[in-house]
Image (cartoon, grey):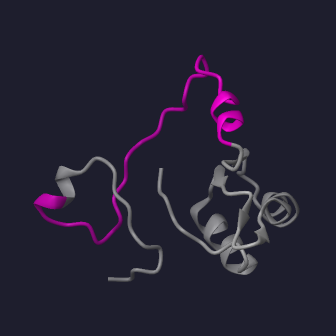
Amino acid sequence: MVMVAVNPAYRAQLGYVLRQSRAAGLFYAGSYRDFAVTPVVDNVVVPQLLEFKKAVSCSYGETFLESGDPRQELPRTTACLPPNARGPAAEAWPIRLWRLSDDR
């Protein structure tokens, strides 16, 4: 899982990040600085993404936590490194986060 912070008010940027990453899911806050995010996710983001499977709003606390099924098996994944990862630190961490705009 890669976590990327994106301002949902910038719909084009949000769509670009999700398309480029081939995102299958999205966790989001229902609102951000008085901006309603849910309509953007439902009407703009989800229809544009072919590989998209699930969008989950984290705005409802306990309801969100209770919405999961603990018996559901998680999909198998493989780890990968960005092309610029080198050295002992790169081998030490099983999960890596990096900026999508980092071209070094």
Above or below — where is 13 with respect to 22?
Answer: below
- Looking at the picture, tell me which residue is in the foreground, 92 or 55: 55
* Residue positioned 24% across, 51% down in the render: 93
> Where does residue 1 sit, x and y in percent of width and height?
48, 50
Residue 69 at what x, y percent from top left? Answer: 65, 23
Q: Residue at x 29, y 72 (%)?
A: 84
Secondary structure, magenta segment, majority class: loop
Question: Height in image: 76 above or below 79?
Answer: above
How many numbered discs?
A: 0
Is 63 magenta? The answer is yes
Residue 9 located left or right of residue 20: right
Q: Which one is nearer the viewer's eye here, 44 or 75?
A: 44
- Nearer to us in this view, 36 or 16: 36
Give the residues drawn in magenta, as a range. Answer: 61-89
Is residue 43 covered in magenta?
no
Q: Residue at x 80, y 57 (%)?
A: 46
Quarter holding the C terminus is: bottom left
Residue at the far top: name it. 71
Relative to 97, 63 lies left or right: right
Would you say 9 lies left or right of 80 here?
right
Residue 75 drawn above or below residue 85? above
Q: Position of residue 4 (x, y in %)?
A: 51, 65
Report the residue at 72% width, 44% height from top: 53
Q: Residue furthest left?
A: 88
